[in-house]
Image (cartoon, grey):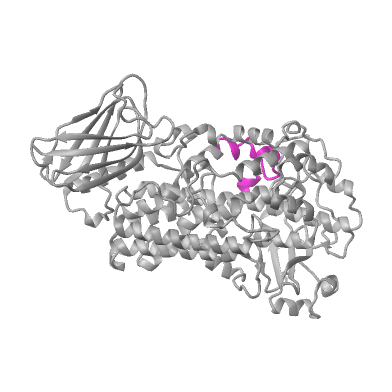
Amino acid sequence: MPSYTVTVATGSQWFAGTDDYVYLSLEGTSGCSERHLLDKPFYNDFERGAVDSYDVTVEEDLGEIQLIKIEKRKYWYQDDWYLKYITVKTPMGDYLEFPCYRWITDEKEIVLRDGRAKLSRDDKTQILKQHRRKELETRQKMYRWKEWHPGFPLSIDAHSHSDLPRDIQFDNEKGIDFILNYSKAMENLYVNRFMHMFQSSWSDFADFERIFVRISNTISEYVMQHWKEDFMFGYQFLNGCNPVLIRRCTEIPKKLPVTMDMVECSLERNLTLEEEVKQGNIFIVDYELLDGVDANKTDPCTIQYLAAPICLLYKNLESKIVPIAIQLGQKPGPDNPIFLPSDATYDWLLAKIWVRSSDFHMHQTVTHLLRTHLVSEVFSIAMFRQLPAVHPLFKLLVPHMRFTIAINTKAREQLICECGLFDKANATGGGGHVQMVQKAMKDLTYSSLCFPEEIKAKGMDSKEDIPYYYYRDDGIKVWEAVKSFAEDVIHIYYESDEVVCEDVELQAFVKDIYVYGMRGVKASGFPKAIRTREKLAEYLTVIIFTTSAQHAAVNFGQYDWCSWIPNAPPTMRRPPPTEKGTVTIEQIVESLPDRGRSCWHLGAVWALSQFQDNELFLGMYPDEHFVEKPVKEAMAKFRKNLDEIVNAITERNKNKKLPYYYLSPDRIPNSVAV
């Protein structure tokens, strides 16, 4: 009688093993085997990290194995089991791999196909077509769209982390408990004694060091020492944690009535302001989106304020970007003066602090929350709903969706919900952040997620004109590496544009993203369908880059740039100044966050800047969803390209006081998971 050798690998996560009864059935082209008992309680098989082998004898030759069914039957208590993969050695000596990388919960069963990636057109037998269809039907019931707030991209239909399908939950929910993590961060930072001291102002700038000195690092300490300098202010628009807002100014807007007399002493080329604009030396950052957003009113004891400034910047003869004019409101007038570097020291300093505070709000809510977290969740839900596990694009994308839905669900549960942690310290808490996302949706376009296109659209693409824009330089390199990898995988499975057009599952995936994620807004520019391999490569690059590199660029520098509170105030407790010559140091300190809010802010930026335990960085694919040699060769080429980028960035950063490493591939997690 034919005999098969079956090898079963259990995950290494905590509690991944099982003591339940486990049964296996093999289904081939010529028949189905009977049910075989692989493990009984207390046999010590299927323990955490174990690889167990069994000989399975069948009555007759099954032909080519098409499916494996695994059943788990409860012995004593609920005992989830994480199955990594199964390999089968046939009587002919061939080896078949059946990737799983899923949890089997309760008394459920799972049916696996072998690991070779297949498009729907490749399935010739009814049993495989039926398995494919049934998998998607099941997933679409589990992964449902839901509107969190009107106008937002749709998100997962789940009230809490525990409501999510087990396969996408964190292995350890405590590890992503925001309340626990923030409290732990404040304890580790030795600031927990201040955390309840709301309404209690700091004495002066030096007083902020009481919560800072124990935890300084290279960049944050440099920021603390140089934050008042115009160079440091301008540098952050290029390489801080929100390097996405600056654009080349092609015309001074009418709402910012800057004159030559105002800025003449800041210009270094003996040119007029108009001539400097024409030569491309003037840049602008406009926080118009914040205009009209309601400030946080959740604490009646502290009135909080927002502003919508406009900041004009200049590239000096050293090619450094420095501020030359700041207006703190959108409407010009006598009570909305234009602040200048030539003004009194504290006038100019407070104007810059207001810009930094506004930049913090734009970063947290638009750059970070909307354009990485919420967009990545859209990609994740659509993938699970429309791409079966055997589809090559599911295998390509699933490492880049790891824990994304889980972290967003936990954030909606604890962090950015009504009365959540976000309300404690942020001026946009209490609903302002919701208004910001709703307003920012009009600028969430497909082209704005295409990294090189967005850089060019802002006029920031010239390395000669803007030589110190490392976010751009490193981002382009990573984008190109990802795109090359996507192209290699596409050419393995899609031999022509016609095959792309005929892939109904791909088209359903793209349509789901457009209809539900982008709410069917034509102006978003998101495609409703994809017709060519070239467009597919770009589309997949947008997804992988957004979920990995873009998130890393705007997330992991938060402690570096925002831990020195005066450089990134999460709230302001006095209104913006309406006249010059009246600002004092006391007024500035009273405007900045109180002790309690400062400590909550510090705990937040610390916790958000930490990598996950056992983080998987870009190009690391330990779960072998792909089994084919050509794809593994493409992965090896991808890793080689990424290693070259790491080496180039490391070399550039040598001896730099302000190294830029957020887009170094060895610091880019595969997915949005924090």
In the displayed structure image, the side of residue 560 where residue 395 appears, left or right: left
Visible residue check, residue 38: yes
State which quadrant residue 3 falls in: top left
* Image spot of residue 666 (x, y percent): 52, 54
Q: Tell which of 509 and 397 is nearer to you.
A: 397
Q: Is residue 262 magenta?
A: no
Residue at image coords 10%, 39%: 2
Residue 428 lies in the magenta-colored region: yes
Q: Quadrant of the image for the N terminus?
A: top left
User: Where does the image place residue 498, in percent across and percent down from the top left?
Assistant: 28, 67
Looking at the image, residue 395 lies above or below residue 647 = above
Left or right position of 129 against 207: left
Residue 10 falls in image quadrant:
top left
Q: Which residues are magenta?
A: 412-437
| Residue toward you, 487 or 40 | 40
Give the side of residue 423 with respect to residue 130, left or right: right
* Residue farthest toward the top in the current orientation of the protein: 76
Please tell me in which quadrant of the rendered image residue 582 appears. bottom right
Residue drawn at x 75%, y 36% is 596
Q: Nearer the viewer, residue 124 or 628?
A: 628
Residue at 40% of width from left, 52% of height from top?
A: 397
Q: Position of residue 301 (x, y in %)?
A: 78, 34
Image height check: is 492 above or below 271?
above
Name of the residue lying farthest toward the right: 581
Number of numbered discs: 0
Image quadrant occupied by the C terminus: top right
Q: Does residue 523 appear anywhere in the picture?
A: no
On screen, residue 403 versus residue 44, left or right, reads: right
Q: Position of residue 31 (x, y in %)?
A: 11, 41
